[in-house]
Image (cartoon, grey):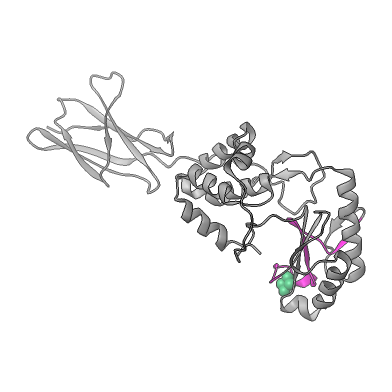
Amino acid sequence: MSHHPVHVEQPSDAEILPRLETPGVLSRVEELIRRYPVKRAALLQVLWLAQETLGWLPNVAIRWSAEKCEVSPVHAYGVSLFYTMYKKVPTGRFFLQICQNVSCHIQGAEAVIAHAEKVLGVDSHGGNTEDGLFTLLRVECLGACGNGPVLQVNDSFATDVVDGELAMPIGVGLDPERFDRIVEWCRRRAAELPEEPVRDALGDILVGTDGHPGATGASAEVQGSYAPPPPALAVTASNVEEGRTKVTWKAAPETTVLHLETRQGGGEFAEVASLSGKDKEWIGELPAGAEIRIVAETAGVRAKPSNIAKGIA
Ligand code: FES
């Protein structure tokens, strides 16, 4: 569905942006971006966050994600097309994807798909039920071939209902009766919970309360913030030409800024320049006895200072 762009009425900025520019969503964006040395690295997760918030990815949301991650809109659009888990069209509350690939096929996927089309009254190429509850889509391998035929309900595998919950017991594949039980589960859930709890890319609930179908890992622990790189290493300074001091160092590749600091007579270090060179730079002559150090910074996070070097007269 998502990798074949189809014409869909695109909502306006005014319809979408207020739903994304909420304190909750914005703080999650900030948190996601903080985990990476460069903003663009968070793009997949920010797109996911937007999709989870809206239920799909309209163009406005893609532009919004691009802006947050400082990439071009066309780059973000291309990414959203490449990964089929990004939905470029709205779906029903329960997005049912049935695998039609070879392992599932030989276990009877076509018969289950035909049954699903009949029960829901929609086709299996993205058909939506009129009540807005279900979207049915035949897909390629879902990576759970041992349980063929396999169904995915939103983010969770499901081939049966066990103890009142969606489940995929080992070796149990989908069949028409199990499909009916799953549809029944979805209808009951829709009656009990007015809206589906929405989780963001890190598993935190954004909207709703409880009872997510529970894909393994869907509520993964929030990880720690991105660890800043080690400091600039092996800093040396030498006055090899009159009036100039050559500073050399080694820094971690993800470092984005290097701050050069100096001090004299054991006082406080003060920043004198930002270094832009790869591993060496010329600065002004250092006074006798002056010390230098470098502080590496990555995505706004400063690492511990480097070793201290002295100018050599
Ligand atoms: S072939 Fe259906 S999950 Fe792999």
Q: Nearer the viewer, residue 279 or 121?
A: 121
Q: Is residue 148 magenta?
A: yes
Residue 12 found in image quarter: top right
Q: Is residue 77 in sight in this rendering? A: yes
Residue 174 visible, this angle: no
Residue located farthest toward the bottom when viewing the structure as drawn: 106
Q: Give coordinates of residue 156: x percent, y percent.
A: 76, 57
**241 left or right of 104 in image:** left
Q: Is residue 244 left or right of residue 53?
A: left
Q: Quadrant of the C terminus?
A: top left
Residue 254 shown left or right of residue 311 in the figure: right
For ligand 1, the image quadrant comes to bottom right
Q: Looking at the picture, how far across and down is residue 170, in whole percent?
A: 83, 66
The residue nearer to you, when weighing 174 against 74, is 74
Q: Residue furthest left?
A: 242
* Residue lying at 34% horizontally and 40% vertically, measured from the top left: 232
Could you tell me how many numbered marks the image carries?
0
Say which residue appears at 69% left-offset and 46% top-offset: 220
Q: Is 260 situated left or right of 198 in this image? A: left
Which residue appears at 31% of the width and 20% of the height?
Answer: 268
Q: Return the x and y of residue 78 as percentages of the image width and height.
A: 51, 59
Q: Nearer the viewer, residue 297 or 294?
A: 297
Q: Please determine whether, in this image, residue 36 is positioned above or below residue 242.
A: below
Q: At x 56% / y 57%, what residue is drawn?
A: 80
Q: Position of residue 135 (x, y in %)?
A: 77, 60
| Depth check, front residue: 90 or 287 | 90
Q: Quadrant of residue 235?
A: top left
Which segment did they paint magenta?
A: 139-162
